[in-house]
């Protein structure tokens, strides 16, 4: 077995592992006003946040389910826990983190990864962040990296100014749901001109049957600043359906740069319905890098609204759908100002009856002249039972723009397979190499340890795919 | 000593069409055989079928490699046992770096099962071989054959030959598409590898022109025509083909095929002979 950089025991990892549940508080299943009030009460939130939650609940209850995209008919909102608290108090230092949680992190390789690569960790175990570590020099520079619950308590003015402004509860049913019951997530504030040069990382994990995970992330990049946030998800495998519905809001101000990297590997029963959106101002750059391997269903379309001239957006995504999985990722770029530029690259792989594809929207408003947009989506289908769907929507309302779209659907080429095998490489390894090569244009943008982990995960998914 | 590669009465079809119509060939380690013949006569088909390309169907015949039944082995098994082909048209594999591909291949050939050969050892090996073929080390960071020039592709194939150290190598028109200097570099590289192998490398050199044979002296020259090896001889046969072209073979072949319809025996017309099995 090849060495695994994160020290995960892969066999166990493949089947998932769980710790016994030890909760101080566990809310009941289902969602109503009382549950929302309870969450807000438990968190000792200010009135405005409680009002925001209750308003969002109203919106959620009124909004219909989306009637496009993946099949969500098996999702039962009454069969989900909306809030679970792992410990009474939040761990302030590593020593204070409960042992059983450390054990889980050990299996995920987080402490080791931290030693090597991490500068700051925000690890969300269940619905709350239990450990946060931020490098001192960044604190001195005024960088804030805390869980969002803490941010509401300690930086109420900052949170209140931006929270819900990029993704309002009215945006869609799942954004409304998250707004009503959110818990955890990361809050990052980068002051003007400050460059955070080591990626900020967080690991998320669900660990209770039928428990939803509704983290809420808010990133604010002041003018001329830069940050790279990395969110890695791995999850154990359960027998009944579970829901992950996050909201990520990012504000990238003039000349600032933000990169947000995710690899989700939710267990194969999770509905992963995430709203991610950024606004980019003059000459700002927003990059979404998104890898989707796990989950039963993923619907996720990271978007960038380019509001002022010179703003740039890049959305890179990889999706892998195996048996029983439907990956419906994509991206959305809105050119609302002249001379804005965007690139979308999507790579999807389907095998064993899985469905993976691309759903995207390119919107160019009148007056956004001189803008450029390039969309490229490639699908690789590994067998005849699997499928790929591409839905590239374009709404171009300005003539003076350059928009290109390229799409390919292919099978693993016999010629390539033969070439590799003619060099002594076994068929399954040859297949893996071709698949890795296929995603390489996106994978090379990942931090090294994530690229290695992604390759390893794809190898696991590929097991048994060839005879 | 029996030959390392023995091909007996090999018949091969591509999509129902019969291409090889009874090929017989014996090659020992330490020997160089040139395989010549006009375009479309089946040279690449023979090379591919020996390597196990699933696109080609064997309909009849047998092949022994080091005494074992080659045709029952998968292509990767054949390669690990020491068979190699330098492709006429190497395919590109976007996204796979040439270095990681080479390291994986060499590791497989050298019997590493789970892990790869140590990176330091690999680098030492590859640096030396790059020099031999006058290849820029930057080629290692590029994707396999992707955007390679014609000459780079051919040299990259021979680099793989050098790295994998096979016992029998089939070189399919490694000299075509190269300018004079390109042919010289590649041919000298092959000759150097051959000499270093000290009798442990057998080569089947498929070529269209005799120009590469100035650098690499074959022991035997075969001519393929219409899916059969119809003439075999010494190095001077190559010169004769160079001087006279293939027309005389075509004429003699026509005589033989006409006669054989009637008698079914061993036939010969000039240099062209044909054994009917
Ligand atoms: N991949 C292929 N697809 C279709 N026909 C092929 C293929 N390979 C070979 N053939 C046919 O087989 C015959 C021999 O071709 P080939 O072996 O390439 O000859 P050579 O290498 O001697 O030029 C030709 O008639 C060619 O059309
Ligand atoms: Mg040929």
Image (tube, grey):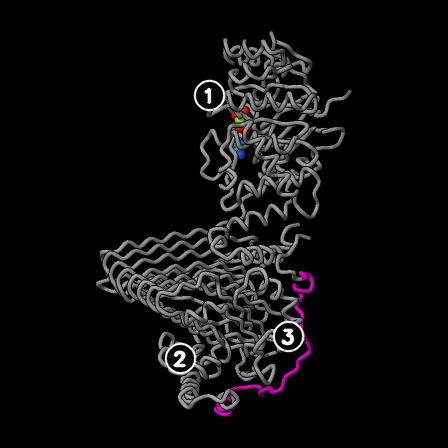
Mark 2 surroundings within 10 Å by alpha-carbon count, few (fewer than 14), some (14 through 19), many (20 or more): some
The residue closer to the viewer here, B138 or A391, is B138
Residue B73 percent location from the top left of the image? 70, 37
Q: Are marks 1 and 2 on the same chain?
A: no
Label 1: chain letter? B
Side of A336 where A63 appears, left or right: right
Give the chain letter at badge 2: A
Residue extending farthest to the bottom is A34
Q: Tell me the distance, in whole angstroms, between the alpha carbons under discs 1 and 2.
A: 69 Å
* Residue range (magenta): A9-37
Q: Is residue A55 above or below residue A430?
A: below
Query: Of helix, strand and loop, which one carries label 1?
Result: helix
Q: Marks 1 and 3: in contact by CB < 8 Å?
A: no
Badge 2 vs badge 3, beta-carbon distance below 8 Å:
no
| Residue A21 on the magenta span | yes
Q: Which residue is mark 2?
A: A159
Compare residues B165 and A284 and report the one nearer the observer. A284
Give coordinates of residue B1: x percent, y percent.
Answer: 78, 20
User: Of label 2 and label 3, which has the lower sequence position?
Assistant: 3
Q: Identify the residue at horizontal 67%, vertical 37% (top origin).
A: B109
- Residue B164 visible somewhere in the drawing: yes
Q: Which residue is mark 1?
A: B181
- Left or right side of A182 for A240: right
Mark 3 = which residue? A101
């Amino acid at each position: 077995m090849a060495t695994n950089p994160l020290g995960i025991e892969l066999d166990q990892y493949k089947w998932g592992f769980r710790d016994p549940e030890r909760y101080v508080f566990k809310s009941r299943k289902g969602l109503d006003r009382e549950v929302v009030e309870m969450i807000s009460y438990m968190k000792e939130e200010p009135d405005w946040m409680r009002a925001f939650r209750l308003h969002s609940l109203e919106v959620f209850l009124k909004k219909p389910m989306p009637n496009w995209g993946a099949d969500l008919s098996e999702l039962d909102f009454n069969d989900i826990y909306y809030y679970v608290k792992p410990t009474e108090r939040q761990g302030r230092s590593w020593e204070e983190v409960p042992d059983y949680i450390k054990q889980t992190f050990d299996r995920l390789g987080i402490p080791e990864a931290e030693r090597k690569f991490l500068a700051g960790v925000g690890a969300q175990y269940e619905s709350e962040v239990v450990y946060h570590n931020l490098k001192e020099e960044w604190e001195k520079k005024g960088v804030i990296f805390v869980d969002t619950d803490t941010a509401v308590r300690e930086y109420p003015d900052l949170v209140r100014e931006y929270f819900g402004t990029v993704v309002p509860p009215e945006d869609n049913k799942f954004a409304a749901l998250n707004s009503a019951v959110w818990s955890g997530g990361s809050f990052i504030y980068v002051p003007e001109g400050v460059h955070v040069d080591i990626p900020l990382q967080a690991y998320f994990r669900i660990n209770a049957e039928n428990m939803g995970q509704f983290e809420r992330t808010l990133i604010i990049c002041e003018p001329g600043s830069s940050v790279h946030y990395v969110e890695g998800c791995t999850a154990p495998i359960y027998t009944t359906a579970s829901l992950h519905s996050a909201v990520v809001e990012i504000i990238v101000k003039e000349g600032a740069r933000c990169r947000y990297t995710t690899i989700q590997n939710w267990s194969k029963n999770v509905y992963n319905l995430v709203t991610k959106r950024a606004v980019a101002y003059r000459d700002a750059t927003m990059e979404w890098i998104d890898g989707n391997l796990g989950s039963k269903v993923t619907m996720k379309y990271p978007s960038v609204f380019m509001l002022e001239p010179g703003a740039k957006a890049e959305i890179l995504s990889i999706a892998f759908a195996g048996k029983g999985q439907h990956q419906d990722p994509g991206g959305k770029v809105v050119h609302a100002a002249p001379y804005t530029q965007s690139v979308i690259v999507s790579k999807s792989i389907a095998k064993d009856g899985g469905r993976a594809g691309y759903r995207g929207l390119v919107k160019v408003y009148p007056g956004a002249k001189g803008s450029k947009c390039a969309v490229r989506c490639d699908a690789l289908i590994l067998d005849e039972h699997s499928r790929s769907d591409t839905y590239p929507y374009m709404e171009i309302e300005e003539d003076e723009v350059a928009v290109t779209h390229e799409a390919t659907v292919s099978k693993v080429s016999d010629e390539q397979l033969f070439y590799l095998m003619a060099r002594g490489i076994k068929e399954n390894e040859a297949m893996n190499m071709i698949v890795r090569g296929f995603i390489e244009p996106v994978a090379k943008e990942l931090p090294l340890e994530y690229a290695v982990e992604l390759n390893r995960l794809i190898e696991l998914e590929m097991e048994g795919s060839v005879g | 000593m029996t030959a390392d590669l023995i091909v007996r009465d090999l018949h091969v079809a591509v999509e129902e069409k019969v291409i090889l119509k009874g090929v017989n060939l014996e090659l020992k380690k330490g020997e160089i055989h040139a395989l010549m013949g006009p375009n479309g006569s089946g040279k690449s088909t023979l090379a591919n079928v020996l390597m196990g390309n699933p696109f080609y169907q064997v309909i009849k015949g047998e092949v022994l490699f080091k005494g074992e039944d080659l045709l029952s082995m998968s292509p990767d098994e054949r390669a690990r046992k020491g068979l190699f082909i330098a492709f006429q048209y190497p395919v590109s594999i976007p996204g796979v770096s040439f270095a990681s591909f080479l390291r994986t291949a060499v590791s497989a050939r050298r019997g590493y099962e789970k892990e790869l050969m140590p990176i330091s050892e690999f680098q030492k090996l590859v640096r030396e071989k790059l020099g031999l073929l006058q290849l820029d080390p930057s080629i290692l960071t590029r994707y396999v054959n992707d955007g390679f020039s014609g000459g780079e592709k051919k040299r990259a194939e021979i680099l793989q030959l050098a790295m994998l150290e096979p016992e029998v190598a089939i070189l399919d028109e490694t000299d075509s598409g190269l300018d004079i200097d390109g042919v010289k570099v590649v041919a000298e590289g092959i000759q150097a590898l051959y000499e270093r192998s000290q009798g442990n490398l057998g080569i089947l050199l498929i070529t269209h022109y005799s120009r590469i044979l100035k650098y690499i002296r074959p022991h035997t020259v075969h001519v393929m025509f219409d899916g059969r090896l119809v003439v075999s001889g010494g190095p001077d046969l190559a010169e004769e083909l160079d001087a006279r072209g293939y027309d005389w073979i075509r004429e003699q072949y026509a005589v033989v095929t006409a006669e054989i319809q009637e008698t079914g025996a061993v036939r010969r017309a000039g240099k062209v002979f044909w054994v009917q099995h």
